[in-house]
Image (tube, grey):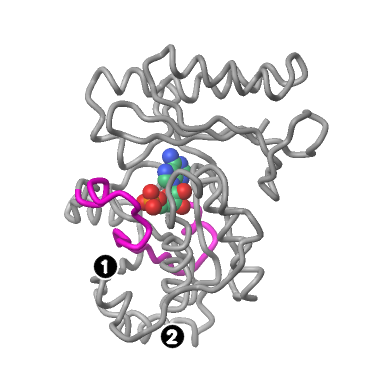
Amino acid sequence: MKIFTHTSTISNWLTRRREKDMTVGFVPTMGGLHQGHISLIEASKSDNDITVSSIFVNPSQFDDAEDLQKYPRNHDVDLDMLNEAGCDVVFLPTVMEVYPPGMDTKVDVDMNGLDSEMEGKFRPGHFDGMIEVVNRLLEIIEPDKLYMGQKDYQQKTIVQYMIDKLGLNVSLVVGPIIREEDGLAMSSRNKRLDPKERQKAATLNKTLKELAALKGEKTVNEAKQEAFEKLKSAGLKPEYVEVCDGDNLKFISSWDESQKPVALAAAWAGSIRLIDNIIL
Ligand code: AMP
């Protein structure tokens, strides 16, 4: 597995491979790797000649300084996992390498409201930072395919929108949510849950599954309310439970308003913020 820390060297190396008609798949991560990330590496490996992953904790997408500071960083473990999964290339840049002083890396795209609710509302500025880093990494890696998880549903929807708006020459492939045995969506932040919070955390997925079962039985608003109350009773602090159209992320108030309704939720387990979603 090759490891690059500089933009110019990885870019040159990949250009030489592309000249030989090799295809490149790219899996951006912030490290703290788990099977969710590895499933994306595996998907990329089966579709492409070369799989590139990046580990970069992007400061511009954190709205919470403590979360940024406590974000798990263990390159040795991460690199071992990537190596074992058969990843070909890892990009491990510094902040200066991704955001060279003087370079304007901000992405000026009107997200048409996709970024205003849910994560966008509770984590102000998060999506501006996220599209900034994704766009910058795509510029450096120039992959044929980009792999992201359904776990971050709003994120993948916004990235697809950005790709279309900017006319970027890359296809987004979305992988399914990989879960722990009790249903908790795998996340780098789960490592910081204490045993009590870890137990409560499983309620998030359970509650979304119960919400899904209420489709057609109760109104959308009743189902959302019931889910919100269940999360509170389980000792979590819910921020939102929403049901929206899976493509345009507009909230729906009746089940037949969308061909592809999705329920999305965020809740705190102690000091750890969890998100999850289910396509209904
Ligand atoms: P992160 O390192 O959290 O920025 O995540 C990197 C990529 O892995 C993103 O595209 C995430 O959506 C994806 N991902 C994170 N957790 C999971 C999971 N449990 N299942 C599938 N994909 C995931």
- Can you tell me whether the CB of the residue at mark 2 lies under 8 Å from the nearest atom of ligand 1? no
Q: Relative to residue 144, is residue 249 depicted above or below? A: above
In screen coordinates, is 150 left or right of 219? left
Residue shown at 61% from the left, 32% from the top? 263
**Does the magenta segment cover residue 60?**
yes
Disc number at residue 92?
A: 1
- Amino acid type of the residue that numbered disc 1 sits on in the rendered structure: Leu
Q: Which residues are magenta?
A: 43-69
Spot occupied by residue 185 in the image (x, y as percentages of width and height): 43, 33
**Does the magenta segment cover residue 162?**
no
Residue shown at 45% from the left, 66% from the top? 134
Spot occupied by residue 177 in the image (x, y as percentages of width and height): 50, 39
Spot occupied by residue 12 in the image (x, y as percentages of width and height): 36, 87
Residue shown at 68% from the left, 23% from the top? 221
Per the image, label 2 sits on a secondary structure element best described as helix
Q: Quadrant of residue 125?
A: bottom left
- Tell me, yes or no, if residue 6 can be seen here: yes
Per the image, label 1 sits on a secondary structure element best described as loop
Q: Relative to residue 90, is residue 115 depicted above or below? A: above
- Crowding at dot 2, Cα within 10 Å, few <14 / some 14-19 / many 20+, comes out as some
Q: Nearer the viewer, mark 1 or mark 2?
A: 1
- Tell me, yes or no, if residue 39 can be seen here: no
Disc number at residue 15?
A: 2
- Crowding at dot 1, Cα within 10 Å, few <14 / some 14-19 / many 20+, comes out as many
- Amino acid type of the residue that numbered disc 2 sits on in the rendered structure: Thr
